[in-house]
Amino acid sequence: MADTERAVRHGQLLSDLLRADAPPSEIRWRLVELTRMQASVAECAGRVEYYSRMLAEGRSTAAAHAQSVLAELHTEGALASTDVVSLSRSVLARPEKKLVRTQLSWLDRAVRGEPGCASASVRVLAEAMETTADIALRARMARIITRQLRAADEPTRVECADAARAWELEERFPLPPRAPLARFTVASTASETVALYRRVTARHHDDWSLDERFLDAVIRFTYRDRDGLAVALGPAVDHEVPAAQQDSSWWQRQRQRRWCAGQPWSIRTLAAIATGALRYPPRGPSRSTPLTDRMAEWGTLALEGAVLPPFSLATPTFDNGGIDAAELVGRLREYAELGLRPGSADFAQALVRVMPTSHPEVPLMADALHSPEGTRLAAWLRGEQSDTEIDALPKYLSAALRGPPPNGRGYSSPLPAYQLPIPESQAAWMSWVDRDRLSRIVSLPGAKGPQVHRAVMTALVSEDARDRAVGVDALVTLAATDELRPDLLARALPVRAPTGRLASSLRDTRHALGAHRTWPLLAAILPVLFANNPTPGLPDLVAVAADCARKSGAQGDLLGLDAVLRRGGASRLTMAARALSVALSST
């Protein structure tokens, strides 16, 4: 290709790349052709205006190519550093982070090579920081401003010095509010109850809510319309129970008694009792659980012809298994109005499921019922339950509430999480990092004490990066609900804590929570680590602390830091400690 044709084609390609209406495919192919042309520095120098427009206004791929060409021109001396500063104003306003990062590096190199441009560069960077939302980019711009201010003129230093220090301070940002709790759905018709029965009995399942919903539906619909429930549910039950029809012959009664002798309390036997197909209690081996005990309690009443309750006290209000405190008070009030006493198993399960309340009138309403159950509920809501009260609960409940034996590892809770939605009790049984369970625990309403913080710390120092990520998410959740306790987190530090992993976790925490919320954690943790023998990862943790202290504007003394500084030397720990000391003493 002749030089004239080459120059014409070069100009055409640049014009096409600057077209705002050009489709992406055309941009892509024009860039391929332009790259293959391998235009020389002299050829590109004559078209700086085109490349500058492409960098400021072009599509991201075209802008990246123009940026590399112009950077080469600057390196070869064909583009002045003052022009690089001028170009940067429009480039730093672009949304593509990669382009902005590359431009910042280029601008920094240009000013280092020609310090006379420092004042103009600082002003361009200060403008860019006004419109840049990305925290990491803003921090990088602040560092460059601080460095370039040394070569800037006096008016620029006076004008931008305070701004540079202000940008070092990280802005506070709000945390997402806690999502509303999902409601526990119950069957609204007898036909839904039949559908639930078929789902529960069709195969083994791991959805605990099906059993709970079916028990709730059986109790409610038997009270409202037992004949209607029998008509709807009977065809699904009768074929499973010998002599299901009301046959009063001695032989049929004996046949059903023998069948019951081998049957446990289950969804099948409960349904058969509700429809009248089963006239004798199951006496087969049955594992005692909150669900089976509640089934047996209600089923015995139904077989004896006693007055049946209108609903179960222990039916959850929310999908996490918890019961709203005010709702439980209302249920007890309705029982009292009907002259009914709650079953012991049903009330015990409801008691450990009730969620704490911030409304002081709810315990007063429970006391006003003037019943033993109301008094017990009021004490429970106030946190006044005694050892005697806990011992009076069924064994599986009291054992779960008390937690595993001291120093006992490998024990598992006698109850699933949905039957005991108490954060501290669930966390006490965690002897290893269970990511799903930890996420659920920190989202539960209720006090988050030493056991929850121990479980979070175990995740933060885990060898598995996925565990550490869940630990950071748990810190965010606790901070969003104002339940994060730095002192409890520090107290949960393991002996010879792997501080390198902890540094990695808290570095991620700073990005998620911000320096203002992360610094109190480090201020509580570091004195504990300083008092012990230094571990290899401690310098990294102190470096994270220095960064958080600087960005949060923290001031004051940190216990144990002076002792580290007195050791002297040029170790990584000493250097990081000096940086932390400077950050804490700066004004």
Image (cartoon, rainbow, N blue to C red):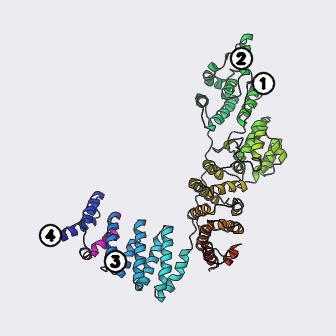
Which amino acid does the dot numbered 2 rest on? Answer: Gln
* Above or below, comparing residue 248 to residue 116 in the picture: above
* Above or below, comparing residue 20 to residue 217 in the picture: below
Badge nearest the viewer, 2 or 4: 4
Q: Is mark 3 on a helix, strand or loop?
A: helix
Q: What element carries label 2?
A: helix
User: Which comes before the other along the chain, label 2 or label 1?
Assistant: 2
User: Which comes before the other along the chain, label 1 or label 4?
Assistant: 4
The percent position of residue 519, horizontal first and vertical second, equals 63, 68
Which amino acid does the dot numbered 1 rest on? Answer: Glu
* Above or below, comparing residue 149 to residue 171 in the picture: below
The rendered magenta stretch, by its main secondary structure, is classed as helix
Cα distance between the residues tagged 4 and 3: 28 Å
Q: Mark 2 points at which residue?
A: 256
Q: Name the residue under label 4.
A: 2
Badge nearest the viewer, 1 or 3: 3
Residue nearest the viewer, comparing 309 with 257: 257
Q: Residue 75 carries which label?
A: 3
Picture quadrant where residue 568 is located? bottom right
Q: Please report contact status of discs 3 and 2: CB closer than 8 Å, yes or no.
A: no
Within 10 Å of disc 4 (Cα), the crowding (few <14, some 14-19, many 20+) is few
Cα distance between the residues tagged 1 and 3: 96 Å
Picture quadrant where residue 348 is located? top right
Q: What element carries label 1?
A: helix
Left or right: where 470 falls relative to 369: left
Q: What element carries label 4?
A: loop
Q: Give the range drawn in magenta.
A: 45-60
Which amino acid does the dot numbered 4 rest on? Answer: Ala
Residue at image location 59% in from the left, 70% down from the top: 543
Q: Which mark is residue 304?
A: 1
User: Which comes before the other along the chain, label 4 or label 3?
Assistant: 4
Quarter of the image containing the N terminus?
bottom left
